[in-house]
Image (spheres, rainbow, N blue to C red):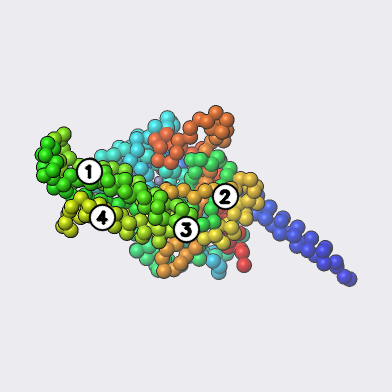
Amino acid sequence: MKIPVFFLLFTALTITLFAQNNTISQVSQVVDKQAKEANKTYIDLHQNPELSLMEVETAQKMASKLAALGFDVTTNVGGHGVVGVFKNGKGKTILLRTDMDALPIKENTGLEFASQIITKDFDGKEAPAMHACGHDIHMTTWLGTLETLVKLKKEWQGTIVAIAQPAEEVSGGSNAMIADGLFKRFPKPDMALAYHVSAELPTGTIGYYPGAIFAGVNSVDIKVFGQGGHGAMPHTTVDPVVLASRIVLDIQTIVSREINPVHPAVVTVGSIHGGTKHNIIPDEVDLQLTVRFFDMDVYRHILEALKRITKGDAISAGLKEDKWPLVKASNQFTPPVVNNADLVLSAIKPMKQFLGNENVVQVEPLTVGEDFGKYGLTEEHIPIALFWLGGVNKAKYQDHLENGTLLPGLHNAAFYPDFEPTFKTGAKAMALTMIHIFNEK
Ligand SMILES: [Zn+2]
Ligand SMILES: [Zn+2]
């Protein structure tokens, strides 16, 4: 008997669609069942935030939860970092990352379970602590995704490398984990995935960008020297206040006149300090800058231009080489997060099937920093993809659209995500994406 080709194709398509729908409903059921427990975990993490480099208890919690799920767990990787490995037959290795640290902010959400924590930061200074960047929802969603994948391990084959990273906010955690052998001591990932909760997108949505989604960031200090003296006799001095003011204006031309306009960059002087009194011309003035860029060549150009322009201004003020300004880039450097376009476009396929095309949206890149980019910049050349996970309560989002009500952004004392829909969307979409990638030929 001859079976028409279109019939075979139709049958194959039906089976595939059925399998996809079946996976979606399985994943949904597993995540929905976890939501209550996950909420308890979330509240505990939210109430007990720990600052960067101080994530001792948070790391213990992540380690014990991973162990309970059957992961092979290693702690203290690059400081308080936790690595869990789950092997499930032959296949790809996917790294899934969460961060763990909170911010020195006094919480002002009005939540019943708001953080009351006053703690010590890494330098021993007393500070409040709050999960104002949503790393608590990252951890909860990460655990939810992992639990789902373990429960549905018959649906996929491969290896999960789950990492809970410390010190994201001070941009040292990913480097420390890499330096401590993340890609050498554990199975080398074929790709790395992560979420950041969004304070702009409503729950039930995911934002993606197939390219550089977050800027590279660095702080730069400029010390401007002069020759101090009496404010009444400026002609006997070289006034560093005037010189620093000139420098602030002159470096505005780096972005506006030197960088190709199709490559966005920012040079901001956030702080200027010098002098003690009205009638004393000081010896020096300190400038503190932040620079942002999406391309490493642009960064190198900005640094070179800062040195050239400050030196030129110092020469024009009559200063000799021993008093040319010192330009020092911080070693807390954060590279741009450059998403791998192929990986992003493959990952959003199952997300779109699950959430609908209209709820998986391409977003604009932002000039904030995220140290996830470092995982993609090692000699292993691991493709990375970071997605925005919508966290804004739907009613508040509607009010924002209709009445212009302001939404508290990330790092705001009033920020918190709408837990349940954020968690459910996040865990389901990431589990589906990982199953899709594991099964993709
Ligand atoms: Zn942050
Ligand atoms: Zn963050």
The residues bearing labels 3 and 4 have C-alpha atoms spaced at a distance of 34 Å
Disc count in the image?
A: 4
Q: Are marks 3 and 1 in contact (CB under 8 Å)?
A: no
Callout 4 crowding tier (Cα within 10 Å): few <14, some 14–19, many ≥20? some
Amino acid type of the residue tagged 2 in the rendering: Gln
Distance Cα–Cα, label 2 vs label 1: 46 Å
- Three-letter amino acid code at disc 4? Gly
Circles 3 and 4 in contact, beta carbons < 8 Å: no
Mark 2 vs mark 4: give the one in front: 4
**Image mark for residue 242:** 1
The disc, 2 or 3, on the residue closer to the chain's N-terminal end is 3
Q: Which residue is mark 4?
A: 312
Q: Is residue 238 visible?
A: yes
Q: On the image, numbered disc 2 is attached to which residue?
A: 362
Badge 4 marks a residue whose secondary structure is: helix
Dot 3: few (<14), some (14–19), or many (≥20) neighbours within 10 Å?
Answer: many
User: What type is the residue that disc 3 sits on?
Assistant: Val
Which numbered disc flags the more N-terminal residue, 2 or 4? 4
The image position of residue 306, as x and y in percent, is 30, 54
Residue 254 placement, left or right of 341: left
**Most foreground residue, 130 or 216:** 216
The residue depicted at 55 percent of the width and 40 percent of the height is 202
Disc 4, ligand 1: is the CB inside 8 Å?
A: no
Distance between the Cα atoms at labels 2 and 3? 15 Å
* Residue that carries the numbered disc 3 in the rendered image: 338
- Circle nearer the viewer, 3 or 1: 1
